[in-house]
Amino acid sequence: MTPEPFSGPPPLLVGVLPNQHPEVLTTAANLAARLSVPLLCAYVDEASYLVEWDPARSAHRLSLHPGEDDDDVRAVTTGIKADIERSVAHSRANGVQVEWTLRTLTGDPARALARLAAETNAPMIIVGTSERGLSHRISEMLNGSIGLWLTHHQSRPVLVVPYRRAAREDRE
């Protein structure tokens, strides 16, 4: 992991989640390697909201659950960093070292990703699709699709990486 800001071209921005299907990070790392650009991974903590936005400093946030916030967020980001390392190591096997960093954001995921993309001048935003199943469909109905919101409300290209399942599982 490298400190921000990146040297050279602006980074590809990828939205990451804990226990996310690996295709999203693998696709983002491989694309970053092919384009020789850094990778900016962003995790949005929906249990917090933005109090003040200052691009020169870190975002000021308040937690909706202040007693458990710091330890939980630290545990989640530790797991996400391990996932990123695995994906970047796979792209490194192809001979290219991908420079990357992880940012933790707050609030609505789609708006937070769009704001970060504008701040860093990211040429593309990469997100995954929702997993299948009734609970994920209900959540998407209530909260909306991040990829759909991004494609309709900002001018950067959005790559939506589908969740791949084995053919026998796809029939469910």
Image (tube, helix red, strand yellow):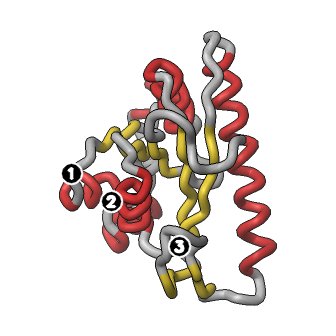
- Foreground mark, 2 or 1, reads 1
Disc 2 crowd, CA 10 A, few/some/many (<14, 14-19, 20+) = some
Residue at left offset 47%, top offset 18%: 34
The answer to whether residue 164 shows anywhere in this view is yes
- Foreground mark, 2 or 3, reads 3
Sequence-first disc among 1 and 3? 3
Label drawn at residue 106: 3
Disc 2 marks a residue whose amino acid type is Ser
The reply to whether callout 2 and callout 1 are in contact (CB within 8 Å) is no
Residue receiving disc 2: 145
The reply to whether callout 1 and callout 3 are in contact (CB within 8 Å) is no
Task: State whether residue 6 is above or below residue 60.
Answer: above
Q: Position of residue 1 (x, y in %)?
A: 71, 41
Q: Position of residue 45 (x, y in %)?
A: 57, 70
Residue receiving disc 1: 155
Give the SS element for disc 1: loop
**How many angstroms separate mark 1 from mark 3 (CA)?**
22 Å
Q: Quadrant of residue 112?
A: bottom left
The extreme top residue here reads 95
Q: On the picture, is 47 further left or further right than 166?
A: right
In the depicted view, which residue is nearer to us: 48 or 139?
48
Sequence-first disc among 2 and 3? 3
- Foreground mark, 1 or 3, reads 1
Disc 3 marks a residue whose amino acid type is Thr
Give the SS element for disc 3: strand
Residue at left offset 76%, top offset 76%: 70
Figure disc tally: 3
